[in-house]
Image (spheres, grey):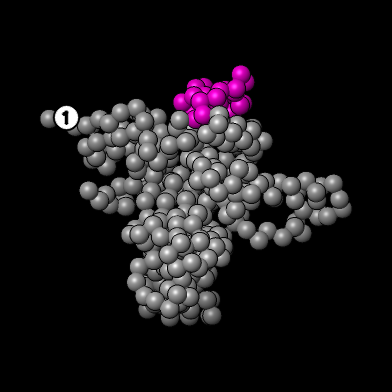
Amino acid sequence: MTVSRRKLIEPQITPYYHIINRCVRRAYLCGDDPYSGKNYQHRRGWIVNKIKKLSEVFCIDVCAYAVMNNHYHLVLKIDTQQQQALSPQEVISRWLQLFNGHPIAVDFVNNGDVGADKKQALSTLVAEWQSRLGSISWFMRCLNEEIARKANKEDDCTGAFWEGRFKSQALLDEQALLSCMMYVDLNPIRAGLTTSLHDSDFTSIQQRIAECHQTSIAKKSTLNLSSIKRSKIGLLPFVGAEHQAKQAGIQFDFVDYLELIDWTGRSIRDDKKGFIPATQPKLLQQMGVNAEAWLDNSNDFMEHYTNVSGKWSRMCSFQQHFGGRWCKGKVASQRLHPH
């Protein structure tokens, strides 16, 4: 049964969400299409570029992404603090980057004010737009509609490009966030498209590694770090646990994440299935997570969870908050309100 979006996305409970969207009929409309013989790889670049633009307008951060041949994954964080701090001018300026301006809003931008008879209408518009700037649904609408229009124009056709509305999973704790990010970053490797994180095209891990290398080169030379061109998505940074009170970001060190994703990627290869090294990565030790359970969870994340992921108790609480009757996860499937 279809669940309303408001029951799947609640930033007051968790700001982190895993988003999945597929091409219609799961066709390879963003890669090598075996039916038409055409190559649509460039459309994956369209998606990455549009995500970048939208992340600069919306109060939504991108933690991870992977754009595949017939679907894409995003791990997003809703920044409610930034959203609530926007001034009316900032709200209007951001919204006008997405849509043609409302006459009242344009009048305000051009003149710095509006007449008394329009102030209430302007206030209503600003409140509505400010709410939308923190909405994943509006973020996805802006992303999917533009890509669909460009693709249909290129193919000289009409009709649906995406397979219905996007799917979302709430990520309720640190383990769920890290496991999902790793699932997303390892998508090309699990699909057999590459065996290297460096060559995992159109993924956040490839971008993070490239930017880390670029920064390292700049530090060793006379280059100013601010002069480095950032043509890709401004990803939510890893800030380390010691900086969590001072800087917004993912509360782990990137070095630890690299170590963990490298180990996870090597361990899920067919020729090393079930292989557990003697030493576990630092992040697993900190979280007290069993290595074998981590591999199972990271490899089959989508099979283990439906629209919410996290500790069993938090998953059940999340479902009960919205009146849900069932909670499904890796552990079990349980009726929440037995008769």
| Residue 279 lies in the magenta-colored region | yes
**What residue do we see at 34% from left, 41% from top?**
306
- State left or right for residue 63 relative to residue 123: right
Q: How many labels does the image show?
A: 1
**What residue do we see at 55% from left, 49% from top?**
193
Question: Which residue position holds label 1?
Answer: 338
Quarter of the figure with residue 284: top right
Please state which amino acid type lies under the numbered disc 1: Pro
Q: Where is residue 291 in the image (x, y as percent from the top left)?
A: 52, 24
**What residue do we see at 33% from left, 47% from top?**
8
Q: What stretch of residues is rendered in magenta? A: 273-295
- State left or right for residue 106 relative to residue 125: right
Task: Evaluate whether residue 72 shows in this view.
Answer: yes
Most distant residue in the right direction = 222
**What residue do we see at 34% from left, 72% from top?**
159
Q: Where is residue 271 in the image (x, y as percent from the top left)?
A: 55, 31
From what the image shows, is residue 176 above or below residue 106? above
Considering depth in this image, is 228 or 154 the residue closer to the camera? Answer: 154
Most distant residue in the top direction = 278
Q: Position of residue 189 (x, y in %)?
A: 55, 43
Task: Evaluate whether residue 13 shows in this view.
Answer: no
Most distant residue in the left direction = 339
